[in-house]
């Protein structure tokens, strides 16, 4: 892990979440959309049968974002049933053209700690319709917060990966039920490195299951799934390392 920096990053008040929609605009996905009780979902299955599955939780740009579906397909290529449900339950995702001055009010109507009903519906679907017996979860940004919540609450999930999940909404909530992997970028302007340091201290004090907090040097918010690994040679090794780390973590606990 790189030496931690002491400087403090603050998100621009005019743009409270420094999020880019990503580079993979033209990716169409290898899976299909299905209905799961009251929500829609994108699902991609591996070429051979398996009882292992991963729930992919969207960022603010929603369940149809090509970048997120690309990650679901990557998980399927590594042997997992991957499903990305609409955790906004029909509400509009954030759009790059939206007015950032209303972002905080928009976020209040999409609470990442109120995803239990959707998680239960997807778990039921995976077990009954897909034959899944071991299920993990991965989430990005908003979805990373949802993963944190589910790792505190849901006994049926085996493990979680929170990728640049915002920390400030989960202060003092670190008694995790399941092994959890937290991924951050060193230069994330929305998640100050000082918050990550405090988080590690809290986990050390309160968490009784396996966890890992990894900071990838020089990288900003969203680098794991919003950047294409073939666009910038300097980014490529870190993007590939993070994705390999994710697969290794899931392989270990699912």
Image (spheres, rainbow, N blue to C red):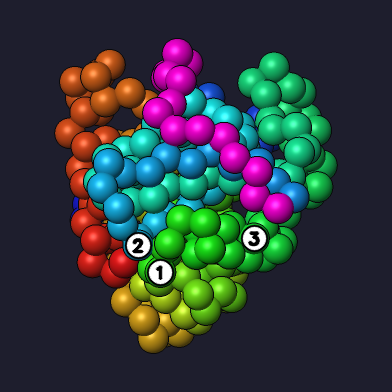
Q: Earlier in the sequence, mark 2 or mark 3?
A: 2
Residue 187 as seen in the image, left or right of residue 48: right
What whole-number distance in Å separates the C-alpha atoms at marks 3 and 1? 15 Å
Q: Position of residue 31 (x, y in %)?
A: 44, 33
Q: Residue at 59% across / 40% down in the picture?
A: 34
Residue beneath disc 3 = 121
Q: Magenta-highlighted stretch: main secondary structure?
A: loop
Look at the numbered disc 1 and give the secondary structure of its residue: loop
Question: Is 58 in the magenta?
Answer: no
The answer to whether one can see residue 250 in this image is yes
Q: Earlier in the sequence, mark 3 or mark 1?
A: 3
Q: Which residues are magenta?
A: 23-37
Q: Which mark is residue 51?
A: 2
Residue 133 as seen in the image, left or right of residue 104: left
Q: Position of residue 254 (x, y in %)?
A: 31, 67
Q: For the residue carrying disc 2, how many other residues have a C-alpha within 10 Å: few (<14), some (14-19), or many (20+)?
A: some
Q: Earlier in the sequence, mark 2 or mark 1?
A: 2
Q: For the residue carrying disc 1, how many other residues have a C-alpha within 10 Å: few (<14), some (14-19), or many (20+)?
A: some
Q: Can you say whether 183 is above or below 76 in the image?
A: below
Q: Kindly indicate whether the residue at mark 3 contacts the one at mark 2 (C-beta within 8 angstroms).
A: no
The answer to whether one can see residue 18 in this image is no
The one nearer the camera, 6 or 246, is 246
What whole-number distance in Å separates the C-alpha atoms at marks 2 and 3? 17 Å
Residue beneath disc 1 = 133
Q: Kindly indicate whether the residue at mark 1 contacts the one at mark 2 (C-beta within 8 angstroms).
A: yes
Look at the numbered disc 3 and give the secondary structure of its residue: helix
Q: Position of residue 19 (x, y in %)?
A: 55, 31
């Amino acid at each position: 892990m790189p030496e931690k920096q002491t400087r403090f990053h603050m998100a621009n008040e005019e743009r409270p979440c420094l999020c880019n929609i990503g580079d993979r605009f033209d990716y169409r996905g290898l899976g299909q959309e299905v209905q799961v009780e009251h929500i829609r979902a994108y699902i991609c299955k591996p070429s051979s049968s398996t009882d292992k599955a991963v729930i992919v939780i969207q960022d603010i740009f929603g369940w149809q974002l090509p970048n997120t579906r690309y990650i679901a397909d990557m998980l399927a290529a590594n042997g997992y049933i991957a499903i990305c449900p609409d955790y906004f339950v029909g509400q509009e995702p954030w759009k790059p053209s939206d007015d950032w001055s209303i972002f905080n009010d928009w976020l209040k109507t999409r609470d990442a700690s109120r995803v239990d009903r959707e998680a239960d519906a997807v778990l039921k679907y995976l077990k009954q319709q897909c034959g899944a017996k071991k299920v993990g979860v991965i989430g990005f940004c908003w979805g990373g917060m949802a993963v944190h919540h589910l790792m505190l609450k849901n006994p049926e999930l085996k493990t979680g990966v929170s990728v640049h999940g915002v920390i400030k909404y989960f202060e003092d909530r670190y008694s995790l039920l399941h092994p959890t992997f937290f991924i951050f970028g060193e230069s994330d302007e929305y998640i100050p490195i000082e918050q990550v340091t405090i988080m590690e201290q809290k986990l050390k004090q309160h968490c009784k299951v396996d966890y890992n907090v990894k900071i990838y040097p020089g990288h900003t918010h969203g680098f794991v799934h919003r950047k294409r690994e073939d666009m910038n040679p300097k980014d490529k090794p870190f993007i590939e390392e993070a994705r390999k780390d994710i697969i290794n973590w899931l392989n270990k606990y699912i």
